[in-house]
Image (tube, rainbow, N blue to C red):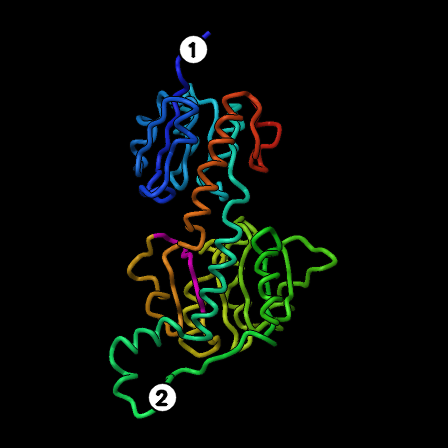
Amino acid sequence: MDSAPAQLVVLDGHTSNPGDLSWEPLERLGDLTVHPRTPPELVVERGRTAKVLITNKTPLNAAALEALPRLKGIAVLATGYDVVDVAAAAARGVPVCNVPDYSTSAVAQAVFALLLELSNHTGELAAAVRAGRWQAGPDYSFWDKPIHELAGLTLGVVGLGRIGQAVARIGAAFGMRVLGCGLRPGPDRLPLETLLAQSDVVTLHCPLTAASRQLIDASRLALMRSEAILINTGRGALIDEHALARALAEGRLAAAALDVLSLEPPSPDNPLLWAPNCLITPHVAWASVEARRRLIAATAANVHALLAGAPRNLVPELGAAGRP
């Protein structure tokens, strides 16, 4: 029986842990190697001896999996797992696990950080004070954009998983009327078109699938009120970015707040980078210290289960078929 420590390889550890947290929960489980980033051409070389590969956004395609015969499991250091060819993994009997619930509080909080910036302009006004505009003015108070209350507005939540439900609760606490819809119908879910037409704020929390890609396209943007706000902390490709840029430029939508784009980092020619009233943050809604600490701990628990032959948090496409 092989008594050597299990070889564990993290392919892209920098975003999850740029140095402010400890990898100790994973170090306890075997011989751990952490690469800050791994380009596609080095995936096989770096994973060749691994018993468990740990990836966040580094793709693991069928060709790479075929070239890694020692691999006994894949742990995705995230909730989304579209970077892994799960069908190819299943065909090889390699289970794939993810972390389904670590960033709920962080992402829900970020949604309202974005919304409040658009409503209260706190960052812009603080920058104006630093620039001397308050000091140079004649009045005790100044602002140059309307400030709005959230109370009384209608919040449309697209996707009613853990994060969507958390956002709905916070919206209700602000005094917002909350509407919900999901990709699957249910008694508490409106059709998407109805939600878009009735909402002052629409926030996206559904996974990216073939059915949801460019879910918010030109035709659905046309259903939204001209004074409405669109927020996306899910996946960038949920939105037709060119259609959104046109809607903002033409004043058919009041504003957008996006933490995700279809290509990350974005291409310099992404039209949303210079679209009016478009607030963009660099995919950080998930990245609180507390959420990343939970992510590493939960990934370690997944790796422990993989090594024990009883995988947990198997991604839905695999189910029992992914068990060794």
Q: 106 left or right of 151?
A: left
List the residue tagged with mark 2: 140
**Towards the viewer: 23 or 245:** 23
User: Residue 308 at x, y = what percent?
Assistant: 53, 20
Using the rendered image of the protein, determine whether residue 82 is visible from the camera's viewpoint.
Answer: no
Residue projecting furthest to the right: 187
Assign a secondary structure to mark 2: loop
Q: Amino acid at mark 2?
A: Tyr
In the image, which residues are magenta?
A: 256-264
- Please name the residue shown 49% across and 61% down the image: 111
For residue 205, which numbered disc appears in the image? none
* Residue 78 sits inside the magenta stretch: no
- Please name the residue shown 30% across and 38% down the image: 36
Task: Please tell me how crowded label 2 is: few (under 14), some (14-19), or many (20+) other residues with Cα within 10 Å.
Answer: few
Assign a secondary structure to mark 1: loop
Residue projecting furthest to the front: 140
The first of marks 1 and 2 along the sequence is 1
User: Residue 24 at x, y = what percent?
Assistant: 39, 31
Residue 22's place in the image compared with 285, above or below, is above
Residue 164: name its quadrant: bottom right
List the residue tagged with mark 1: 3
- Please name the residue shown 30% across and 83% down the image: 134
Residue projecting furthest to the bottom: 138
Q: 207 left or right of 35?
A: right
Task: Please tell me how crowded label 1 is: few (under 14), some (14-19), or many (20+) other residues with Cα within 10 Å.
Answer: few
